Amino acid sequence: MHELDAGTRSFAGQLGFIEFSTEYRLPRHVHIAPHEEVSNSRRFICERIVVLEGVALVELNGEKYVIPPKTLVSIAPGVPHTWTACPPGVTVGEGDGSLISQEAFLMLYEYEDATGFFPTRQTRTLERIEEYERCDGLESIRFPKLSASDVRDQCWVVWNTEMTRKKYK
């Protein structure tokens, strides 16, 4: 058994999965839901992603990360983010446990509350709904196409409980 979350926040939003390839690049976005306690009000909500298989790339607040399989990513409310699959040829981990990206990954997602997709050009955590700026030019805010070399130069690597700028061989 692998407990990924202590259960301090309850989740009542959509639950689903997405199969990604390097051609499927989400536009940067946040998630907003009606505020339960204040009528005619909205709030940013939390999202949880489990990378089930394959190697993912995520951008959080403008920083790019390599995410290996069997990893939980909790995205705090108001954090702009986007996803795609890691291009082929990136080695993640070391020794017998290492793996090489194959340009695809499978994610399981769950939202704190029912939500929609709110695209944004912004790359910093939004604290108040009034700070949100909608972006309709979705192509301009998609995760950029990266080569394996770009990933090595630009991305943080998450492995076990560590996050590093890995020096590749």
Image: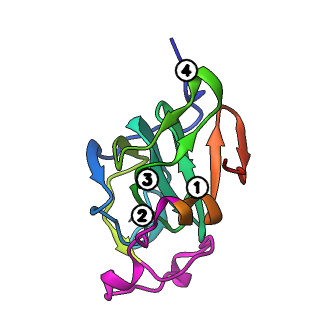
The magenta stretch is 120-148
Q: As shown in the figure, which amino acid type bears the numbered disc 4?
A: Glu
What residue is pinned by disc 4? 3
Tell me if residue 136 is in the magenta stretch.
yes
Magenta stretch, main secondary structure class: loop
Is residue 128 within the magenta segment?
yes
* Residue at the extreme top of the image, as rendered: 1
Asked if residue 52 shows in the view, the reply is yes
The amino acid beneath tag 1 is: Tyr
The residue that mark 2 highlights is 31
Please name the residue shown 50% across and 11% down the image. 1
Tell me if mark 4 has few (under 14), some (14-19) or many (20+) residues whose alpha carbon lies within 10 angstroms of its own.
Answer: few
* Numbered disc in front, either 2 or 4: 4
Residue 45 drawn above or below residue 117: above
Q: Nearer the viewer, mark 1 or mark 3?
A: 3
Nearer to us of marks 4 and 1 is 1
Viewer-closest of 97 and 138: 97
Residue 162, quarter of picture: top right
N-term mark: 2 or 4: 4
Lower position in the chain sequence, tag 1 or tag 2: 2
> Which residue is disc 1 drawn over?
65
Q: Give the residue number, with chain letter if any, for mark 3.
A: 86
